[in-house]
Image (cartoon, grey):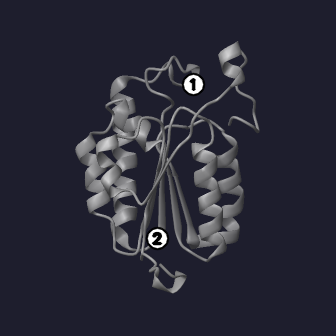
Amino acid sequence: MAFEDYKQKDSVVVIYTGEGKGKTSAAVGLMARALGNRWNVAFIQFIKHWGVGEHVFIRDIQPLFKDQLFFYKGGKGFYNAGDISAQHVSDEQHQLAASETYETALDCVRSGTYKLVICDEINNAVHDGLLTKKQLEHLFKQRAPHTSLCLTGRDFPTEFLKYADIATDMTKIKHHFDDKFLANKGIDF
């Protein structure tokens, strides 16, 4: 097939999943590419609420992009992971935060305002039971025709690969955490 025989889709669904590091970093890179092409972008955070580097970066660049970049941080920390930052958060508070964040993401996906909506760590929220698979499927089906969607997090439900145009499994080969070293600021978060 010749190159001129290829067509371009109006929008795509991108999945970054797996046990390896780099899912959020890939989504931030995708955000940078979209903003560089003057797209309106919504970055919706489902888990991380503490001061991670990507949040500081997004906060700092928001004034440059004004209404072109929407950022919503709705998470309460990792659920049932012994995360010290979330140890005083009840199951109900996690559930409520996930539901509110989902509604924000759904509004962004439906609106047609954004050419790219990134739902960072949404796969974790589904895997942990804070959101249902039915809600995730609804997000795919409610997407405005020209809105691309990026979902990140471990444990993406394989039965939904049919909705994906690009799916990447980040595979860990080695990580210093396995040798009992804590995550490094600037590298891991």
Single out the residue that lies furthest toward the left. 134
- What label does residue 85 carry, if any? 1
> Which mark, residue 8?
none
Q: Earlier in the sequence, mark 1 or mark 2?
A: 1
Q: Residue at x 34, y 40 (%)?
A: 157
In the picture provided, is 186 more to the left or to the right than 6?
A: right
Q: For the C terminus, which image quadrant?
A: top right
- Image disc number at residue 114: 2
Q: What residue sits 44% from the left and 80% below the top?
A: 7
State yes or no: discs 1 and 2 in contact (Cβ < 8 Å).
no
Whether 145 is drawn above or below 88: the answer is below
Element at label 2: loop
Q: Position of residue 92 (x, y in %)?
A: 33, 28
- Disc 1: CA contacts within 10 A as few (<14), some (14-19) or many (>=20): few
Vertical order, 124 against 91 (above or below): below
What's the CA distance linking mark 1 and mark 2? 31 Å
Image quadrant in which you'd find residue 149: bottom left
Check disc 2 and give the amino acid type: Tyr
The total number of labels drawn is 2
Bin the neighbour count of mark 2 within 10 Å (Cα to Cα): few under 14, some 14-19, many 20 and up: many
Report whether 84 appears left or right of 164: right
Q: Residue furthest bottom?
A: 4
Q: Nearer the viewer, mark 1 or mark 2?
A: 2
Residue ID at (42%, 71%): 11
Q: Residue flagged by tag 1: what amino acid is it?
A: Ser
Residue 88 in the image, given as x and y percentages of width and height: 48, 20
SS of the residue at dot 1?
Answer: helix
Dividing the picture into quadrants, the one containing residue 60 is bottom right
